[in-house]
């Protein structure tokens, strides 16, 4: 029996990835003399991937990667004006209003009190907490947990902290890699809600599983919990 519902934040409860893609396009515009959007994006992803172990996730790490890639592709010829513009482009992401996606608040309100509810997100702690505050959704959660990664280890630790077995946990999220696969591997259940934009780093091969359901919209969670999952 499911006792705890855990929810991802970015692109599950509110929009996030499109802001990064818009910033990437604007950044490529600043560097248009050094390549196409496709070639610059490929260079950026390579730098982001190499920086991940040290910088983790989030806008601040993204801005550093934007600047590092810009210096690299320009051969060190980045101007002060270009540098300032790239920082401005990146900082705009920090103002994400975190407006709840359609059906999110109504669904959380309906589920509140019927289950223990956790918001589990990865990234920069300060940035993520600001988004949680702006969203107005914190009141629906018994725990808000911000972690550097979301792997089997983090989900196991969450179960230990909540004093539940993995089979009593259900995770809701848009990333099969971070939100779904680790929970299924641990023995929990998942509801997968794909978002229209997915970061390349979060893409893995998806698969069917007896403890997994796929939802087209956030509000579908209520029917899935009532009718489809034990």
Image: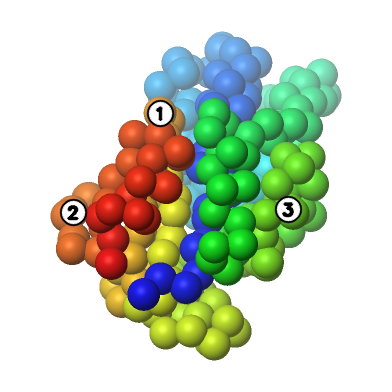
Comes first in the chain, label 2 or label 3 = 3
Comes first in the chain, label 2 or label 1 = 1
Query: At 40% from the left edge and 71% from the top edge, which residue is drawn?
Result: 2
Marks 1/3: CA distance?
25 Å
Question: Circle 2 sits on which residue?
Answer: 207
Query: At 54% from the left edge and 77% from the top edge, which residue is drawn?
Result: 158
Q: Position of residue 133 (x, y in %)?
A: 79, 47
Circle 1/circle 3 CB separation < 8 Å: no
Query: At 61% from the left edge and 62% from the top edge, which residue is drawn?
Result: 113
Q: Position of residue 35 (x, y in %)?
A: 48, 17
Res 138 label: 3
Given residues 142 and 180, the one toward you in this image is 142
Res 43 label: none
| Colour scheme of the rendered structure | rainbow
Marks 2/1: CA distance?
19 Å
Circle 3 crowding by C-alpha within 10 Å: few under 14, some 14–19, many from 20 = some
Query: At 59% from the left edge and 38% from the top edge, which residue is drawn?
Result: 106
SS state under label 1: loop
Q: Is residue 126 above or below residue 89?
A: below
Q: Position of residue 198 (x, y in %)?
A: 41, 37
Question: Circle 1 sits on which residue?
Answer: 196
Give the number of callouts: 3
Q: Is residue 75 visible?
A: no
């Amino acid at each position: 029996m499911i006792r705890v519902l855990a929810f991802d934040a970015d692109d599950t409860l509110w929009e996030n990835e499109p802001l990064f893609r818009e910033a990437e396009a604007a950044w490529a515009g600043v560097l248009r003399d050094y390549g196409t959007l496709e070639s610059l994006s490929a260079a950026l992803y390579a730098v982001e991937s190499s920086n991940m172990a040290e910088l983790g996730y989030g806008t601040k790490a993204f801005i550093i990667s934007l600047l590092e890639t810009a210096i690299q592709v320009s051969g060190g010829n980045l101007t002060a004006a270009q540098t300032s513009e790239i920082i401005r482009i990146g900082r705009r992401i920090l103002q994400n209003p975190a407006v709840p996606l359609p059906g999110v608040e109504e669904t959380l309100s309906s589920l509140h009190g019927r289950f223990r509810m956790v918001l589990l997100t990865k990234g920069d702690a300060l940035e993520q907490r600001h988004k949680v505050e702006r969203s107005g959704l914190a009141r629906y959660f018994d725990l808000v947990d911000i972690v550097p990664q979301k792997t089997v280890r983090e989900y196991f630790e969450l179960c230990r902290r909540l004093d539940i077995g993995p089979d009593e946990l259900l995770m809701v999220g848009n990333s099969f890699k971070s939100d779904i696969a680790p929970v299924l591997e641990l023995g929990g259940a998942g509801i997968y809600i794909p978002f229209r934009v997915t970061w390349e780093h979060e893409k893995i091969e998806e698969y069917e599983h007896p403890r997994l359901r796929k939802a087209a919209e956030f509000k579908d969670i209520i029917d899935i919990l009532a009718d489809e999952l034990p």
